[in-house]
Amino acid sequence: MTENYYSILGIDKNASDDEIKRAYRRLAQKYHPDRNSGNKEAEQQFKKINMAYEVLSDKEKRGNYDQFGEAGANFDPSQGFTGQGFDFSDFNTGFGDIFESFFGSGTRSRKKGGQSMRGNDIEALLKLRFEEAAFGTEKELKVTKSVVCERCKGQGNEPGSKIVTCQHCGGSGEIRTVRSTFLGQMATSRACDVCRGEGKMPETPCRDCNRATRVRKTEHIRVKIPEGIDSGATIRLSEKGEGGMKGGPSGDLFIHVEVEPSAIYKRNGYDIYSDKHVHVLQVTLGDEISVETLHGLVQLKIPAGTQSGTLFKLKERGIKKLRAKGLGDHYVRIIINIPLKLSKKERELYSQLALEAGLKVKTDESLLKRMGL
Ligand SMILES: [Zn+2]
Ligand SMILES: [Zn+2]
């Protein structure tokens, strides 16, 4: 069976106006884009249903269609063939209004202009050197954002100029349009684009912001970095975000902290880790060594026989705890350096040590001979 407007609506040629309406209502609800988001087939079907209904619900168009087919339906005796069906160019916005008016499923709420609005929060990244984070500092941050226009104090009008009633909408803030559609006369309203839905507007727009009430501005913001802060922390500066609209409060500024690594120290919470390279004899015999810490040089006793990798704890030589008492600790890891080159004398002494330790070290015979062994 070839598809025709009757088959699209699933009705027969003798269907009454009421039957056509009921069929349309049922199918339009089934294939409405709101219920079939992203479904191209449903969208096509929805268009067809509407096309069919447009024709069959109109006595004259239906008569022409019955007589001449599809071309006949669009025949306007005064203008000839218009070739126009329903205009779907604004399918997603325009049609929703008509559909809702028809089915009475509520009218779309339109955002009223003139309400005060809080400014947006903004985010910034702040890089800190290792020591800056450990000890705290003060930094200056350059932030470009929308701020309340100083010239008009956020009013949008040139200082001294009056706020007048919008001539375009007569002060209602709404533009009503009546369209002839296949469902009859449809009234839709939208925000007046001259006064932006406010009903009133400045007689002379502000020279700086041209009614926008806000302007872009680069601000230098000083921020105190607390002692002990670490990567991943966020500092919030209240009302340092974008300016509000119509007297609304400013948003906040969120500063995300990133701490650069140190060449010497590793950080774990408030504890610090560092490596200390020592000569094999220092750990063999025991020694007292100097260790670099965030708080200066510290003397550390390493007992004889200390093994490679041993951790020594320097109590409270780490980072000051954020919003708490006390400091973290500093851990020193001992790395034993084996001499890469020995002098002749050193070599003899090491060989003697090896013998003393009962080690049969396979070294060259000439050395042992020279030593008289
Ligand atoms: Zn301004
Ligand atoms: Zn207006």
Image: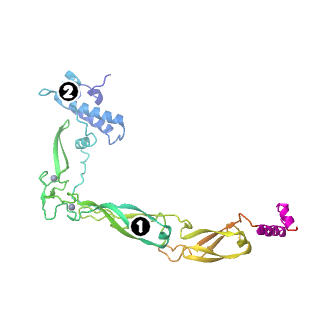
Question: In the rendered structure, which amino acid carries the disc numbered 1?
Answer: Ile
* Magenta stretch, main secondary structure class: helix
Tell me where residue 184 appears, x and y as whole percent: 17, 38
Q: Closest to the observer: 57 or 214?
A: 214
Task: Report the magenta residues as a range.
Answer: 344-370
Residue 284 seen: yes
Which image quadrant: the C terminus?
bottom right
Seen at 21% across and 60% down, the residue is 208
Q: Is residue 171 left or right of residue 338?
A: left
- Residue 360 showing in the rendered view: no
Is 251 in the magenta?
Answer: no
The front one of 76 and 359 is 359
Which x, y percent locates residue 173? Answer: 17, 53
- Residue 289: which quarter of the image? bottom right
Q: Residues within 10 Å of mark 1 (few under 14, many from 20)?
A: some
Relative side of 1 to 67, left or right: right
Return the residue at label 1. Answer: 235
Task: Quadrant for residue 138, please give it.
Answer: bottom left
Q: Toward the viewer: 264 or 319?
A: 264
Task: Residue 161: give x, y in percent of width and height.
Answer: 13, 62
Q: Which mark is residue 73?
A: 2
Q: Mark 1 falls on what kind of element? A: strand
